[in-house]
Amino acid sequence: MKLEVRVPQLSDSVASGTLLPWRKQVGETVARDEALVDLETDKVILEIPAPTSGTLVEIVQSEGAVVKADEVVAVIETGENVVVNPPAAKPARPPAAAAPTRPAAPVQKASVPLPAAAAEPAVAASAASRREPMSRLRQRVAERLVAAQHTAAMLTTFNEVNMQPLNELRQRFKAEFEVKHGVKLGYMSFFVRAVCTALEQFPVVNAAIDGNDIVWNGDADIGIAISSPRGLVVPILRRAQMLSSAEIEAAIADFAHRARESKLTLEDLSGGTFSITNGGVFGSLLSTPILNPPQSAILGMHTIQERPVAENGQVVIRPMMYLALTYDHRLIDGRDAVQFLVAVKAALEAPDRLLEEG
């Protein structure tokens, strides 16, 4: 019996995908639910599994084909006496016709020695350029960034935070935290919880514009920008205001692992009311992050750098980080944006409460 392998249902925001190299070839046996081929969409890579065990007898859509939900991509046959349909072979290229030969020029003997030919100047070898198609994810990111530039009135405000209290707190509790919860105590849980605290004070930063309406979001669904082999992805921490520090750290570690393995789902990347991006892990000292529409604000973290600062009339060296908040000025006034960032700074510089469970 033959069974068709079809593209799984996609989300409303994903219309199609591109087939990556097939993991199985015609004639090979496959097991039920075994991944046959990956489907690259503009958000995630999805596996197309075998609906049954049997033999892959036909590949209907080859690598690079753009396919839609429920479209047939292959055929599997169960039972014995399986007949496979190998992919059509490419026609052999006919041999090139031999060009007519010209008669050889007569050889002349010189009666005197000829001068040695001048050596040609050496030509430096140049690196070869190459061209490759953009991935669907990169195309989608490019479209969204350009759209954000064209539709939102983006403005960025800056501040800096003294990271010494947070560093000291992490040093005191990181070993105990890891033993108790099985995850490392990083910086992101503090920043997520500081953002949630500030969003409670300034809910307009968590809101969004929809046509002529303002959507006031009750939950803080925080997008965490993560670099993956395919490019930037932003999985969502759902109801982050309800998560403990351990739950935040575990969720982010899981996101990072699945991003490296291309295992994030469409659900992981859908929605979000506010985003955090950390260019500091790559050494960025200062930047102006771009909004992730339809969100109205994004927080940029940067590298921690020891700098001289004034404290109580004295110049001291402290580990400092610049913070950047890019916001949509159509919705968020400068006063709210600045005060929101000051609230984040204040929470991070008194981090004891941010480590509470709950």
Image (tube, grey):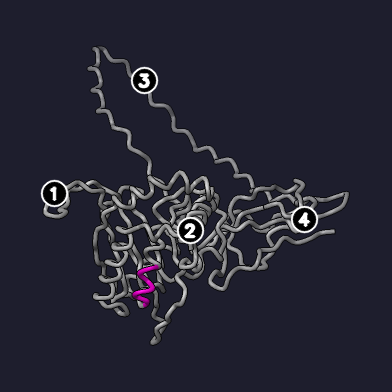
Query: Mark 1 sits on what residue?
Result: 315
- The local secondary structure at tag 4 comes to strand
Helix or strand or loop: what does disc 2 sit on?
helix
Q: CA distance from mark 4 to mark 2?
A: 43 Å
Q: Earlier along the polypeptide chain: callout 1 or callout 3?
A: 3
- Left or right: 117, with 13 as reference point: left
Residue at 33% from the left image edge and 48% from the top image edge: 168
Q: Amino acid at mark 3?
A: Val
Residue under label 2, please give it. 248
The residue carrying mark 4 is 76
* Callout 1 touching callout 2 (CB < 8 Å): no
Earlier sequence position, callout 4 versus callout 2: 4
Rendered position, 259 above or below 8 = above
Q: Residue at x 81, y 55 (%)?
A: 77
Q: Earlier in the sequence, mark 4 or mark 3?
A: 4
**Is disc 3 surrounded by few (<14), some (14 to 19) or many (20+) residues within 10 Å?**
few
* Magenta-highlighted residues: 197-203
Q: Which mark is residue 107?
A: 3
Q: Quadrant of the N terminus?
A: bottom right
Label 4 or label 3, whichever lies nearer to me, is: 4
